Image: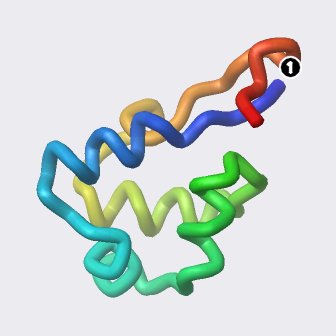
């Protein structure tokens, strides 16, 4: 299964939060933002930091897609 983080970026827009603000509040590097934008693997620790920073649940920031639906 593939993972899509589109929900995260929509949530950030809705909250008026920039990538830099999320990184500062979550305490992680720009590398994590790059991985999220490319729908690459991100550790559960990083997902937890993002959820805490945005005060949301995992299902609010990511969704699983069947492999044939993976976006490039």
Q: Position of residue 67 (x, y in %)?
A: 86, 19
For this orientation, the residue located farthest to the front is: 72
Q: Quadrant of residue 32?
A: bottom right
Assign a secondary structure to mark 1.
helix
**Color encoding of the figure:** rainbow
Residue shown at 44%/68% (left/top)?
A: 49
Along the horizontal axis of the image, is 23 left or right of 47?
left
Q: Is residue 63 above or below residue 32?
A: above
Q: Quadrant of residue 1?
A: top right
Picture quarter with the C terminus: top right
Along the horizontal axis of the image, is 26 left or right of 56?
right
| Tally of numbered tags | 1
Along the horizontal axis of the image, is 61 left or right of 38?
left
Along the horizontal axis of the image, is 11 left or right of 2?
left
Residue shown at 52%/36% (left/top)?
A: 62
Residue shown at 68%/52% (left/top)?
A: 38
Q: Quadrant of residue 8?
A: top left
Q: Which residue is mark 1?
A: 67
Q: Position of residue 30 (x, y in %)?
A: 55, 82
Q: Is residue 31 above or below residue 51?
A: below
Residue shown at 78%/30% (left/top)?
A: 2
Give the class, few, some or many, for how many residues have Cα within 10 Å of label 1's Cα (few <14, many ≥20). Answer: few
Q: Position of residue 44 (x, y in %)?
A: 65, 58
Q: Is residue 65 above or below residue 23?
A: above
């Amino acid at each position: 299964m593939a993972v899509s983080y589109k929900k995260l970026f929509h949530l950030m827009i809705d909250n008026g939060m920039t990538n830099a603000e999320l990184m500062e509040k979550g305490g992680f590097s720009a590398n994590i933002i790059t991985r999220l934008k490319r729908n690459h693997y991100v550790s559960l620790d990083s997902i937890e930091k993002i959820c805490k920073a945005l005060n949301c649940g995992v299902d609010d920031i990511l969704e699983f897609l069947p492999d044939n639906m993976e976006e490039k």
